[in-house]
């Protein structure tokens, strides 16, 4: 199971998140994001070996993703935008970011080779940390059929508008592989509110273990 805190920009927040139970940290490499961090700066933020370092990219060239993955020692590349499977890296797991709107169809992603689908709320032209959620209950009905059995096409990570007040309900409805929080646990873009972050991780960890 994945407990991810995204939008990490400094060592203090990274350390606090890991100590509170996060096993994945997200670094936003989208230059237009208020949480942007350069790969070289992300590389300076120390993390334990068993914590996944995830880079967030938006419509980025594969070559730059590869360079950032090497420099920042990424364990996964979270790709948002119009990237196709030809843009997926070798040797680095891919989490494909998908916005859930009224037209969202989980079956479309049945053959997606990504390690996980990160499902986020609608956010217009924004990418990452919009604080908007979606109808998690819809995921319970959106399953694909394989060999006569209900099966999700790949692992699901929930994102968008999650915090301590709603993450348990989201998990109970959607039964994801993991959850990801960002803007709802911040005091300012790129700076975590430690109380909110710790409360989120505690609530999420308890719900995922049920």
Image (tube, rainbow, N blue to C red):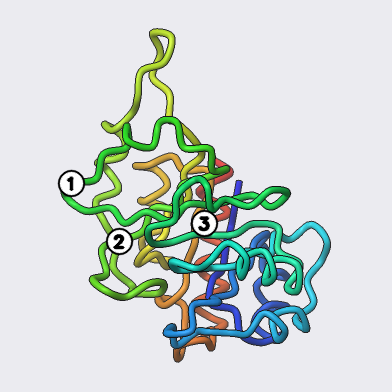
Which residue in the rendered view is the most extreme toward the top? 148
Is residue 192 shown above or below 124? Answer: below
Find residue 30 and name its label.
none
Q: Quadrant of the C terminus?
A: top right
Number of labelled discs?
3
Query: x, y (%) of residue 177?
Result: 53, 43
In front: label 3 or label 1: 1
Residue in the image at 52% along x and 86% along y: 190
In this view, the residue in front, 97 or 208, is 97
What is the x, y in percent for residue 43?
75, 79
Say which residue label 1 marks. 103
Disc 3 to disc 2, C-alpha distance: 18 Å
| Disc 3: which residue | 204
Inter-mark Cα distance, 2 to 1: 12 Å
Residue 30 against residue 114 in the figure, above or below = below
Instruction: Give the quarter of the image for residue 202.
Output: bottom right
Q: At x 40% / y 13%, what residue is drawn?
A: 149
- Label 2: how many residues lie within 10 Å, few (<14), some (14-19) or many (20+)? many
| Farthest residue, direction bottom | 188
Residue hosting label 2: 121
Q: Secondary structure at mark 3?
A: helix
If you read the primary sequence from the N terminus, does the residue marked by circle 3 or circle 2 appear first?
Answer: 2
**Which residue ends up furthest to the right in the rendered image?**
49
Disc 3 vs disc 1: Cβ atoms closer than 8 Å?
Answer: no
Disc 3 residue crowd, few under 14, some 14–19, many 20+, Cα 10 Å = many
Q: Residue at x 50, y 45 (%)?
A: 85
Are the two marked residues, 2 and 1, in contact with CB atoms closer than 8 angstroms? no
Which circle, 2 or 1, is nearer the viewer? Answer: 1
For marks 3 and 1, the one nearer the N-term is: 1
Indicate the position of residue 17 as horizontal and vertical percent values: 65, 73
Nearer to us in this view, 130 or 71: 71
């Amino acid at each position: 199971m994945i407990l991810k805190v995204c939008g990490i920009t400094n060592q203090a927040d990274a350390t606090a998140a890991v100590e509170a139970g996060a096993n994945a940290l997200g670094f936003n490499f989208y230059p237009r994001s208020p949480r942007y961090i350069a790969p070289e700066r992300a590389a300076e933020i120390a993390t334990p070996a068993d914590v996944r370092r995830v880079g967030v990219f938006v419509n980025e060239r594969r070559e730059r993703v590869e360079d950032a993955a090497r420099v920042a020692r990424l364990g996964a590349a979270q790709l948002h935008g119009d990237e196709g499977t030809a843009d997926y890296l070798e040797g680095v797991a891919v989490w494909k970011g998908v916005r859930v709107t009224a037209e969202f169809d989980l079956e479309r992603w049945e053959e997606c080779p990504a390690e996980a689908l990160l499902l986020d709320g609608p956010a217009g032209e924004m990418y990452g940390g919009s604080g908007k959620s979606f109808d998690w209950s819809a995921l319970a009905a959106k399953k694909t059929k394989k060999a006569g059995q209900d099966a999700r096409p790949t692992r699901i990570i929930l994102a968008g508008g999650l915090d301590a007040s709603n993450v348990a309900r989201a998990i109970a409805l959607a039964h994801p592989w993991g959850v990801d929080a960002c803007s709802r646990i911040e005091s300012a873009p790129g700076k975590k509110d430690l109380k909110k972050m710790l409360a989120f991780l505690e609530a999420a960890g308890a719900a995922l273990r049920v």
